[in-house]
Amino acid sequence: MKDRILNKLSETKDSVKLVEENFPETFEKFIEMSRLERDGIYKNIEFSIQNILDICAIIMKEEDLKVPESDESMLNELGKAGVLDKDIIEKIQDMKGFRNLLVHRYGPLDDEIAYSDIKEGLDDFQDIFEEIKRVIS
């Protein structure tokens, strides 16, 4: 279990680092990027969020908690059981909502809102990484 989580965590850190290294300082520079470059950022964020949810599912299994019906119930169960900090769960839930927007594209993606969400959310990944390390040690 720990090896699987560490592997997924490493992949996630690599994707987040790639986004951080290529994420422009302003929205104007972001919108000047090619669609392919912006989509690359979106895809790496989507991948990172999905990996975090996968890690949570592995933790659920290892903690012998009931099988969740959804990501939402999984996160709620991890919180109720005291496995993950409630602030971290809220951050993951917010990320999950953003991931759903990226995956399902419920219409045209508003690049300005997406840029703002990514810029504000990048630091949250570090908090989540620390919490996952705490849980598995």
Image (spheres, rainbow, N blue to C red):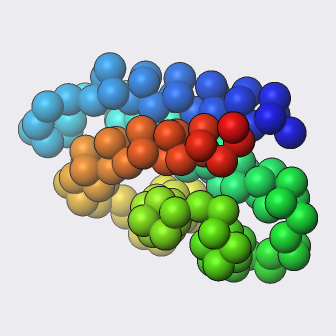
Q: Quadrant of residue 57?
A: bottom right
Image position, residue 60 (x, y; %):
79, 61
In the displayed structure image, the side of residue 28 where residue 111 appears, left or right? right
User: Could you tell whether 46 is left or right of 116 in the image?
Assistant: right
Whether residue 47 is visible, yes or no, is no
Of residues 26 and 87, the one nearer the viewer is 87
* Residue sitting at x 71%, y 48%: 55
- 72 left or right of 34 in image: right
Q: Nearer the viewer, residue 35 or 14?
A: 14
Residue 20 x, y percent position in the rendering: 33, 27
Residue 106 visible in this rendered orientation of the protein: yes
Q: Relative to 137, is 121 on the left or the right? A: left
Q: Quadrant of the C terminus?
A: top right
Q: Above or below — where is 59 with respect to 132?
A: below
The residue at 31%/22% (across/down) is 22
In this rendered view, identify the residue nearer to me: 60 or 101: 60
Q: How many marks?
A: 0
Occupied quadrant, residue 48: top right
Residue at 39 percent across and 29 percent down: it is 19
Residue sitting at 86 percent across and 39 percent down? 1
Q: Position of residue 18 (x, y in %)?
A: 43, 22
Q: Is residue 8 above or below residue 78?
A: above
Residue 107 higher or lower than 33, as above or below: below
Provide residue 30's location: percent of width, then percent of height: 21, 35
